[in-house]
Amino acid sequence: MPRLPLPLTRKQPRRYGSQAPGSGKAMTQPQHKDVVDVLLEQHQQIKSLFDRIATAEGKQKQELFYDLVRLLAVHESAEEQIVHPEARRAIGEDGERVVDARLQEEARAKRVLSDLYDLGVDHPDFGARLAAFAHDVVEHATHEEQEEFPRLRERVDPDKLYRLASVFEAAEQIAPTRPHPAAGESAAANLLLGPPVAVFDRIRDALRSG
Ligand SMILES: [Fe+2]
Ligand SMILES: [Fe+2]
């Protein structure tokens, strides 16, 4: 019988938003999101980008596809470096199966994304292949949301989940999804245009050294 997904309830952290004794001031900035909130938000952003690419044309379609490459690179690399190892520890014996299956899906997604990049957004087959890829990525995200994230919320200290959110958001700074020349487009953002394998590698290396 299939296991019912656990509820994605969030526990409150012990420290954040508390008052320093006698000061009347908050000791730390209240942190509103834990790492699971950040992951769920990114899943929504990924789904919405797939929809926008499907209906865009020309230069806009190309730019949105680059956005997708960067967002997937940030999201999946940060999951590989930060979230899956935590889940493997937290889930216990079953964690090996759950995490290994997710890593295989992510490796396959990276290959398909590279194929789409090589094909190019103007190729007549691009739309159909993007739709098949979107289906697989959404299925992968659903597996994470049902099998992995609820167990993180259940078994990892809430304070740690809030701390991991900031690490995760720092990863997003490495690869802004929408670089804008007027906002001082960084050399880093330009470096993050290109073949998906190279973009994934740069973000993974930055996360490891950060
Ligand atoms: Fe993932
Ligand atoms: Fe994910």
Image: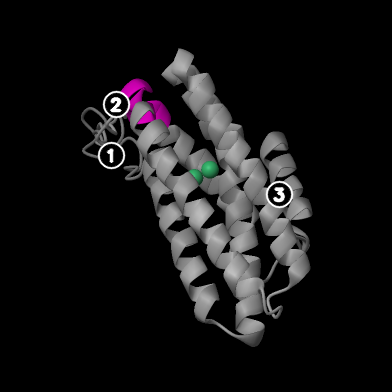
Please name the residue shown 62% across and 36% down the image.
104
Residue type, label 3: Phe
Q: Give the image quarter of residue 153.
A: top left
Residue type, label 1: Ala
Q: Give the image quarter of residue 33.
A: top left
Give the number of the mark in front: 3 or 1: 3
Instruction: Determine the CA span between mark 2 and mark 3.
Output: 37 Å
Can see residue 190? no
Q: Is residue 136 left or right of residue 81?
A: left
Residue 94 x/y as whole percent: 45, 18
Residue 97 x/y as whole percent: 52, 23
Residue type, label 2: Met
**Residue indicated by mark 1:** 26
**Residue indicated by mark 3:** 200
Prevalent SS, magenta region: helix
Range of residues picked out in magenta: 152-161
Can see residue 107? yes
Of label 2 and label 3, which has the lower sequence position? 2
Check whether the beta carbons of the residues at disc 1 and disc 2 lie within 8 A of each other: no
**Residue indicated by mark 2:** 1
Secondary structure, mark 2, is: loop
Instruction: Determine the CA span between mark 1 and mark 2.
Output: 48 Å
Q: In the picture shown, does residue 49 fall above or below 182?
A: above
Label at residue 7: none
Q: Give the image quarter of residue 92.
A: top left
The colour style of the image is one colour
Q: Is residue 154 left or right of residue 200?
A: left
Instruction: Determine the CA span between mark 3 and mark 1.
Output: 38 Å
Of label 3 and label 1, which has the lower sequence position? 1
Q: Quadrant location of the N terminus?
A: top left
Check whether the beta carbons of the residues at disc 2 and disc 3 lie within 8 A of each other: no
